[in-house]
């Protein structure tokens, strides 16, 4: 959180266009899509798992939503279809990880490939830009603004506040952290560990689906490349936000701050005229630095 | 309170327990001793409901019972395992209430965790046990004695009548051992029956009313601690004395 403020402060001094209303609007909207998914990813990581499939689930949910819209159906139905696909992906991930105790890395890596491939199959590799009778509604939802903030940013704010309350006050979130802390003892305490895991993978997928629906409204079109490579940025956001990949730690505001930081880094590089080819290096580097900081902090804790 | 009648347990051809009788009353501390593989853990797991004995009967308040982990808990039997089964990343209070969280209703409908009540109740439990453990501390930052207090407080939550303690003094410092022994004494005073498994002869003799020695699945001694000695117990465990 402090890092985000510090970087924003420095950038507004160094670069004139940074602090402009337009740029801040764009930055906030860009990280809203990632931040939303990072909330779910944080819950998954807090159980000691990981969800690599979020980018592909986004692609599949986006394509399905676009296709249903294009066939003349209303947005509500299209959203249900898109979210339904995301739900199915989440159920498969969660069932395999929770009940069959397969490795989350392998299961969600498989789903990454499967969902992307299904998006290709159902779209026949076409770009979908005809959103049917509800087109204006879709574009307004993802691309519009309200009281000076982009709609996705409002949704992120609501979701983050909801997630923060959830982490603090819900029994399920307590179990999520318990599973990540010590799975065996959580099981001995009579907590349904498999069901807890299933729930977080479903949440993660559903948020990826929701983010996809917003994003196609902003983009005004959907291709099956939607969300490609997003898993890295989402996981980076969660980890930079303090989610511990070993499980047992993570919070809602951290995930949002992590997403904001990554987008700020990207934006700053652009404004400073750094070749965009360097972006991957900086985003990747920031994950590693976040891990190092975490290690130093933890080292101090155990020493004290 | 608890009575085992000629309980036997075999895993395939391996006889883990043969014809074991055992009685344990309210407020009584029984030290269960034996070498590795003598059947101590098997016995504990039978009482905790994890294993069903292959022969013999388990009686609770003089009535025969078929124990499962759940039904054992409902009867008031709580086990505290050697590895303590705590979540390091959570606070003491969160661990005490794990799986039995207290909640209140926000605006009369929305169930939310009642952090204040859990903190208050765990602070009370720690005070009752005479432990300096603080409810908000993370288990990760605690001493072995404090962890033991958290594990025992968790088991105490349901006001059990019988507690099964598996090596509660293994792997902790001398000062912490004194703390744990004090915990056991205060539980005894509150009328809780305790089955204590321990390798540490001095601990058993410090708190137990009776010692029971198992050797290769058979009970070879069951007598008041006052009538025995560490030397005799060692001899019984190793087989230097056949039975006493």
Image: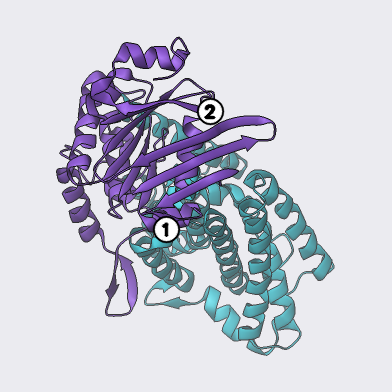
Chain colours: A cyan, B purple
Residue B237: numbered disc: none
For disc 2, the marked residue is B217
Q: Nearer the viewer, residue A278 or B242?
A: B242
Question: Residue A173 in the image: x percent, y percent?
Answer: 42, 58
Q: Nearer the viewer, residue A247 or B235?
A: B235
For disc 1, the marked residue is A173
- Asked if B125 appears above or below A81 in the picture, the reply is above
Question: Residue B191 in the image: x percent, y percent?
Answer: 21, 46
- Asked if A206 appears above or below B142 in the picture, the reply is below
Q: Chain of mark 1?
A: A
Q: Give the CA distance from mark 2 to mark 1.
A: 44 Å
Query: Position of A129 compared to A139: left or right?
Result: right
- Asked if A26 appears above or below B19 in the picture, the reply is below
Element type at mark 1: helix
Q: Report whether mark 2 lies on the same chain as mark 1.
A: no
Question: Residue B24 in the image: x percent, y percent?
Answer: 33, 41
For label 1, count other residues whose C-alpha is less than 10 Å away and answer few (under 14), some (14-19) or many (20+): many
At a point 27% along the width and 79% down the height, the residue shown is B107
At a point 54% along the width and 74% down the height, the residue shown is A143
Q: Nearer the viewer, residue B168 or A296?
A: B168
- Asked if B41 appears above or below B60 in the picture, the reply is above
């Amino acid at each position: 959180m402090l890092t985000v403020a510090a970087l924003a402060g420095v950038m507004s001094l160094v670069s004139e266009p940074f602090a402009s209303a337009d740029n801040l609007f764009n930055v906030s909207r860009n990280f809203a899509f990632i931040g939303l998914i990072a909330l779910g990813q944080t819950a998954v990581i807090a159980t000691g798992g990981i969800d690599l499939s979020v980018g592909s689930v986004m692609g599949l949910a986006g394509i399905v939503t676009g296709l249903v819209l294009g066939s003349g159906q209303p947005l509500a139905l299209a959203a249900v279809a898109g979210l339904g696909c995301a739900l199915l992906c989440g159920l498969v991930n969660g069932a395999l990880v929770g009940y069959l105790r397969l490795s989350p890395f392998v299961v969600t890596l498989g789903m990454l490939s499967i969902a992307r491939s299904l998006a290709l199959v159902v779209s026949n590799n076409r770009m979908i830009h005809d959103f049917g009778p509800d087109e204006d509604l879709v574009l307004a939802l993802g691309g519009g603004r309200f009281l000076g903030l982009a709609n996705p940013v409002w949704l992120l704010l609501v979701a983050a506040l909801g997630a923060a309350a959830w982490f603090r006050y819900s029994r399920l979130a307590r179990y999520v952290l318990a599973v990540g802390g010590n799975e065996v003892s959580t099981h001995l305490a009579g907590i349904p560990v498999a069901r807890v895991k299933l729930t977080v993978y479903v949440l993660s997928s559903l948020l990826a689906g929701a983010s996809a629906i917003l994003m196609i409204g902003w983009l005004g079109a959907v291709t099956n490349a939607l969300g490609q490579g997003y898993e890295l940025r989402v996981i980076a956001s969660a980890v930079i936000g303090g989610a511990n990949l070993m499980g047992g730690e993570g919070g809602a505001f951290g995930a949002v701050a992590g997403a904001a930081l990554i987008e700020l880094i990207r934006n700053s590089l652009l404004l400073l005229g750094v070749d965009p080819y360097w972006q991957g290096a900086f985003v990747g580097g920031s994950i590693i630095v976040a891990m190092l900081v975490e290690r130093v902090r933890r080292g101090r804790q155990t020493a004290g | 309170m608890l009575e085992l009648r000629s309980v036997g347990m075999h895993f395939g051809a391996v006889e883990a327990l043969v014809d074991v009788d055992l009685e344990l009353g309210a407020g009584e501390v029984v030290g269960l001793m034996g070498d590795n593989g003598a059947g101590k853990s098997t016995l504990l797991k039978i009482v905790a409901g994890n294993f069903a004995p292959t022969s013999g009967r388990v009686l609770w308040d003089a009535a025969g019972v078929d124990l499962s982990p759940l039904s054992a808990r409902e009867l008031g039997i709580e086990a505290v395992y050697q590895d303590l089964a705590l979540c390091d990343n959570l606070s003491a209070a969160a661990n005490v209430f794990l799986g039995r969280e207290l909640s209140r209703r926000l605006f009369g409908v929305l169930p939310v965790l009642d952090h204040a009540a859990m903190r208050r109740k765990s602070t009370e439990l720690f005070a009752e046990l005479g432990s300096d453990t603080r409810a908000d501390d993370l288990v990760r930052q605690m001493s072995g004695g404090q962890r033991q207090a958290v594990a025992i407080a968790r088991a105490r939550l349901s006001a059990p009548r019988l507690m099964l303690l598996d090596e509660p003094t293994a792997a902790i410092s001398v000062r912490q051992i004194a703390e744990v022994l004090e915990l056991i004494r205060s539980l005894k005073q509150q009328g809780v029956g305790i089955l204590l498994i321990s390798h540490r002869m001095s601990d058993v003799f410090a708190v137990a009313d009776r010692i029971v020695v198992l050797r290769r699945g058979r009970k070879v001694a069951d007598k008041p601690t006052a009538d025995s000695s560490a030397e005799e117990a060692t001899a019984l465990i190793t087989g230097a004395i056949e039975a006493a």
